[in-house]
Image: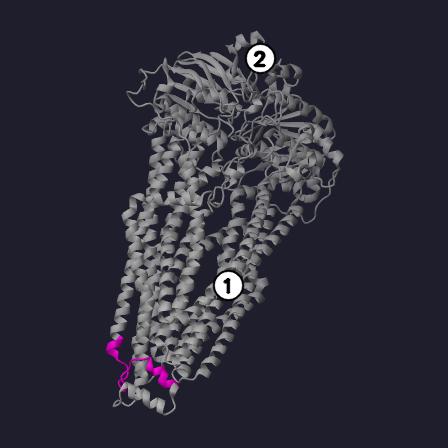
Amino acid sequence: MLWKLVREHARPYTGHIIAVLVLQLVSTLATLYLPSLNADIIDQGVAVGDTDYIWRTGAVMLGVALVQVIAAISAVWFGARVSMAMGRDIRRSVYTRVDRFSAEEVGRFGAPTLITRGTNDVQQVQMVVLMALNFMVMVPIMSVGGIIMAVQEDAGLSWLVWVSVPILLVIVGIIVGLLMPLFQRMQDNIDAINGVMREQIMGIRVVRAFVRERHEAERFTDANAALTDTSVRIGRLFVLMGPIITMILHLATAAVLWFGGHRVDQELVQVGSLTAFMQYLLQILMAVMMGTFMFMMLPRAVICARRIMEVLTTPASLMEPAHPRTPEHHDGTVEFREVTFSYPGAEAPVLDGVSFTAPAGKTTAIIGSTGSGKTTLVNLIPRLYDATSGEVLVDGVPVTQMDRATLTRAVGLVPQKPYLFSGTVAENLRFGRPEASEDELWAALDTAQATDFVSERTTGSGEDVRTGLESGISQGGTNVSGGQRQRLCIARALVARPRVYLFDDSFSALDVTTDAKLRAALGEYTQDATVIMVAQRVSSITEADQIIVLDEGKIVGQGTHHELLDSSETYREIVDSQITAEELA
Amino acid sequence: MSGRHAKTRGSSAAKLKRGSTKKQDITTTDLTEEEIAQFQEQGVTDEWGGGAPRKAKAFWPSAKRLFATFGAEKVGIIAVVAMVVVAVVFNVWAPSILGDAMNVIFGGVLSAQMPADLTRDQVIEGLRATGNGQAADMLSGMAFVPGQGIDFGELARLILIVLGMYVVAQLFMWLQGRVLNDIVMRVVYRLRQDIEAKVNRLPLSYFDTRQRGDLLSRTTNDVDNVQSAMQQAFATLVYSVLTIIGIIFMMFWLSWQLALIALIALPLSGVVIGIIGTKSQKLFTAQWRHTGQLNGHIEESFTGHELVTVFGRQQDMGERFDERNEELYQASFKAQFYSGMIMPIMQWVNYLGYVGIAVVGGLRVATGQMTLGAVTAFIQYSREFNQPLGQVAGMSNMLISGVASAERIFELLDADEQEPDLTEGAGRNELAQPVRGRIEFQHVAFSYTPDKPLISDLSLTAEPGQTVAIVGPTGAGKTTLVNLIMRFYEIDSGRILLDGVDTSTLDRGVLRGQVGMVLQDAVLFGGTIRENIRYGRLDATDEEVMAAARATYVDRFVHTLPEGYDTVIEDEGANISAGERQLITIARAFLADPALLILDEATSSVDTRTEVLVQQAMAALRTDRTSFVIAHRLSTIRDADVILVMEHGDIVEQGSHEQLLAAGGAYHRLYMSQFTQGVDLDAQAAAVAPGTGPIPVQAGPDDVTPAEREGTGDPGVAATGGLAAPQAPGQGSVEPDVPGSGRP
């Protein structure tokens, strides 16, 4: 998965990557050449007493070192470029993919995990690519180059390479092999202990109310003991690893001295070559070790890559029509024809054979208990989801055959959960219609009963004080109260001036006074538009032109308030649960 | 020689694993938006904001205290330091003996070329005589026996000595690592236990006034941070500093001239780190800023996905994404390039030193002022020198950040605790069994913050078995009142009695054990539905759990779940709706079978039809129990024995539904406002405006921070900033009191 993801996104940077390879090759070769030059200094300079040669070779060494550093820095330049650019591209891929998702896919993944995948996960992959280009590439070059150079210095000693490298690999491999599952366990332990702590802090009232402090402390102690146990094991392996590896390197050095000494004595090799060989062997072993440790980074990156690929390979279920149809009329009629909707894999449909017409310019209210499918019904109109079967029509054209922009202009939604974007009040209001004039914004705010607080609103401090429409909104709209947020969301939909307004339980955070004023003003503002509103309170919809009663995804009643009181049992139940009959009269 | 290499790699691998835990960071996204709003309002975000630990406010005192936590492990720590010293001595000494071994080989090679019948001095003389003065100079610095060749006995002896030294050094390194590891883990374990104990002793007001994300971050990330600082930084620092000293000593001992050349590299490295390091630090800051901005944008686009879709803003948002993505790319490329440059440059400086030593050393060997072995040993020393230097720099950062984390933990550990319960014999009272459930408030005064009195003089009596409903606008003190019964907060004056016993003289556990509480936000714990219900009474049998579930209509929806009672409740997973969660909390209280029941907006997320069913269940639950019910839907509390109408921390009306309706006072207006909308706005305003009923001079509702509770996606009426008149409670809206939103 990691490979596939990287390969797909590496394509535009093939040139860069080749540059990294070449430069790393140069840099590594230069690094490898230095011990050889040092050997020459000893053998042909020191041993013979040729100071001139020592100076000359010294200058060459400096030159080689300069080449090495230039190559290395250039390699880092290209490496950073490629890896960061790939990170950027993968992020963009994830973003554009999610952008095309319908609410269904977003819901299936959940926004939080999508965010993690688009941010942290990409970052992990990007770091692995960087590491690979900066270090991993060097490992094989260094190993192969080191072996070649070492053999060149003294082929007779090369068996030391064949012996020491596998020993190091096996030992490091064993320790890493022991560590990996422990890391996984440690991660689980940390999640567990953080989870317990999180629950205790978030649920502190419940813990205290039920006098479960001791119970919680026991849970925590268990988690703490488990975490400590794993940490101790990991720590012990770690402190073992350093000394063992160091010892292997020392043994290799000693072996070179001993066996090399014999070969020098037999005049098979020169002293300088011996020191060079020693350094090559160490370089090879270091490279091998580094490569092994790099591998420890991989599993995590592989998981991240898999999570990213999951997003990238999920097809968006909403398709743009190839040949969009233009609406037959522009009055904002909404019609449901035998609409059924079920979530993939779910047994029972959320909506089951729903048919009704919301006539143009009229108000249609939808009521029903939790889980009866009200929100789903509303969400089908702006095509947040597509119906599993049946058709949803706006202005006489099925929404699936409508151009997205046309549909967007026709329909305005105030969602159940009021959400604002970071920016200014004005930017938020213009979200649906960027070209709206300031007067239009105020008109919408007037209707939404938001003029007072917006005009008095001030954010920022010092030089950066901004007021009214220009005052700042934080991400999600957390710096306004729930009621204010809801009113701004309503105003935002009003500014867009769609032909169809959808209010999904959009007045819940408003107090009675504001609610009543808002409804009165709204009636005027949306006079010619079709209004579909989901409601919880019966009292708020008694005036609607048409009420649709949903129960378990089916329409069980349709008519005006008074008609339904006579005809629909479910409606009466809802009414009874909220209001007694005589109070209504 | 490369032990340090292994060590660095090891620690960076450990960092890696730790890095992954950081991903768990409790960022603000974990908080409900209301909590964030609340804290932004209180302006505490900066001071208490979570995230990366900054520099410690007072480094040395905190560092001292951190080390003091190792007090119990003094012996172990001394042993560790002693072992490190031994290991360093051997590690630093060994290369010079390796150099001697090198000399044996070199000398042997040269000697083999000489006639065996000459003495050492004769050879040197002979060389001088033939005009080979240079070679003579070189040989004069060496020990050799002409014609003998390499002395393998001596070579073997030296190699064995070196190996022996390394074995001892590595053994001690391993041993100290192991001992230190166990010590650190014990200390961190105790630290975690201390924190847990502390959390259970902190008063609730502490949790109210702090950002929970920050609190969590202190108890988790900061502890992790301390752990890694202690585990890695401590040992590595000691080892590195000692090694540096040892190497410098050995270098000067071998040749002060070469030592000076090697040390030239030191200021050069300093300059490199100084210039490029500072630059890359700045670039990294920029990178994190851009990362934050981009992540913010991604979060917004994904969270507000449906709005972006509905309002057709994909293109616009996409362009902004591209812009920020590009900015991040540029910033991170620069940061990575600059920081990536440090290593090659440092290496280059190292090579410069290496070449310098090779050349100067070679010249000195050629003139006999130094042996070849000494030069090879020197080269080795100079190569090993940069390693601990870099580590000291890296580990100091780690240590600084560890101390900053420790400081944050100590702040938590030092926070004021709640008054301990009275001990037996020190005036503690016991409850007579069976508990009848009579609650009496006698002139109770309470405020979250001294300058903002909330309840000034409240008296009430609830007889055993009575259902007491509490209604009133936001901020009237409804939740506060029930919290006081639970002794979540201590009252300022007056008394609260349970069955005639002052609750402040009772053990908190005993008191709370008598009360079942259902809160507005349905807090459930990780685990199955069964486990969550059982939380109410840990020793309940499965049958009892199921009975409670049936009585509270949990059973109904549990049957529609594939895993039934073993369904694991997930935080994010939408497998259980908000209403269903609330039913589970009701079942939990049901199972506890308490003498006293408190229902604080218990059914706010349950739809009205289900609520009717739950009401029936709760009616059953309420019989023979004193119950306090806070409800926003007045329809649900009509049959309460007593209805208390609260305003501004005081009870303004009291009586049964019929009595209060007939009285035509505040309750009547509240009631009418819920059922007939917009008929008489003025009357409604009057209903809650000051002047109606005996309202003491107290803080208005706007003085209580209106934290809206999440639970239903149906947030309550928040008192808008500068709201003059309190708002009437909206029907169907949740308008919770703010339990303990005492402002800091």
Pick the residue in front: A213 or B622: A213
Q: How far from the left and from the top, in percent, is residue A120?
A: 51, 49
Look at label 1 and name its amino acid.
Leu
**Residue tagged by mark 2?**
B666
Magenta range is B134-155
User: Considering the numbered disc 2 on the image, is that residue within a helix, a strand or a loop?
Assistant: helix
Q: How many labels were placed on the picture?
A: 2
The answer as to whether the residues below labels 2 and 1 share one chain is no
Look at label 2 and name its amino acid.
Ala
Q: How far from the left and from the top, in percent, is residue A212?
A: 36, 29
User: Marks 2 and 1, Cα distance to the nearest angstrom?
Assistant: 74 Å
Residue B656 part of the magenta-drawn span: no
Tell me: residue A263, above or below residue B244: below
Q: Residue at x 30, y 71 (%)?
A: B97
- Tag 2: Cα neighbours inside 10 Å, few (<14), some, or many (≥20)? many
Q: Residue at x 47, y 80 (%)?
A: A55
**Is residue B135 rendered to the left or right of residue B697?**
left
Chain for mark 1?
A: A
Q: Which mark is residue B109?
A: none
Tell me: residue B609, above or below residue B370: above
Q: Which mark is residue A133?
A: 1
Q: How far from the left and from the top, in percent, is residue B371?
A: 35, 77
**Is residue B322 rendered to the left or right of residue B469?**
right
